[in-house]
Each structure stands twice: as structure tokens, then as C-alpha cells.
Amino acid sequence: MQKVKHQLVFREDDYEMLTACLNDAQRESAFGAHVMATLKADFKRGIRVSRDEFPADVVRLNSRVKLKEAGNNKVMELVLVMPDEADIKQRKISVMAPVGVALIGFREGQEVMWQVPSGQKTFTIVEVENQD
């Protein structure tokens, strides 16, 4: 596998689950056309790898991620999950939420941006923990 630092990387099994979710027409109204189009575009420009080849520092489904907001030392921690598992009280964030789409496929050290009610925010992925 060729390693490119800024190449988006998706694990095959995650890709298959998310593609099935994206192909469900009823989901578009629930998640929004923009979120779904962004994830589809990310899939087109990223690479898919097997479980054995998947880098440990890349965000995938069920990753525990620590993010640092640009401009301050505020760190937040979340777990990226499928939409039906999302629970904000447990910091489980849907992969179909704007933050989920902004994170999946990216790796530790990379900056990601997403739109929040107060405007666009930039975060650095400071730690990724993956468990099977």
C-alpha cells in the first residue's frame, strides 16, 4: 500500500456500511444532501484498504478521537459511530453529522474544518484510538 500523508483512507468494511447508508434514499432527508454529497466525494478521492492494511492513526467508525480547537487549548473527545448509535451525552457522534464527515478517513496530526452555528471551525486531530 502506498502511503500518502494527506490521502483519505477508509477501511473496506466501514466503506461498505457507509455506502449502503448513502444509497438509502430515505437517509438523504435525515442527514441532508450536502453531508451525503461531501461523504461521497471523500470516498471518490480516498483509498480503501483491508483491515490488516488499515493505519492505526486514521479515524474510522468507532474511533475514539481527541481534537484540539485552533486558537485555544480546548480539547474535546468523541467516538464516531453509525447514526443509530449516536448519543451526545456519551460523546458518540454520528458519522453522518458534519463533524463525522469532517473526520472520517483523516489521520492524527491533520487539520479538519466544519461548519458550526458560530461559523467555520478548525480542529487538529491530536489522537486516534481504534479498537476492533
Image: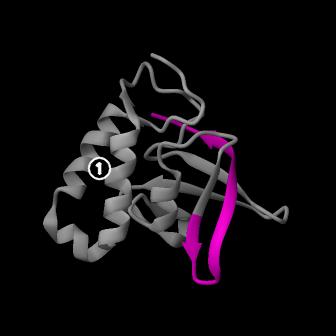
Question: Left of 41 or right of it: where is 27?
Answer: left
| Number of other residues with Cα within 10 Å of mark 1, as a class: few under 14, some 14 to 19, many 20 or more | some
Q: Quadrant of residue 50?
A: top left
Q: Amino acid at mark 1?
A: Leu
Q: Nearer the viewer, residue 46 or 89?
A: 46
Q: Which quadrant of the rendered structure holds the N terminus?
A: top left
Q: Which residues are magenta?
A: 114-132
Q: Residue at x 53, y 22 (%)?
A: 3
Q: Nearer the viewer, residue 97 or 40?
A: 40
Residue 10 position, x and y percent, is 40, 37
Vertical placement of 61 versus 89: above or below? above
Determine which residue is flagged by label 1: 18
Vertical placement of 104 versus 121: above or below? above
In magenta stretch: residue 127: yes
Residue 130 position, x and y percent, is 54, 37
Vertical placement of 118 versus 61: above or below? below
Q: Quadrant of residue 33?
A: bottom left
Q: Residue at x 52, y 45 (%)?
A: 63
Q: Looking at the image, which residue sits at the far top?
A: 1
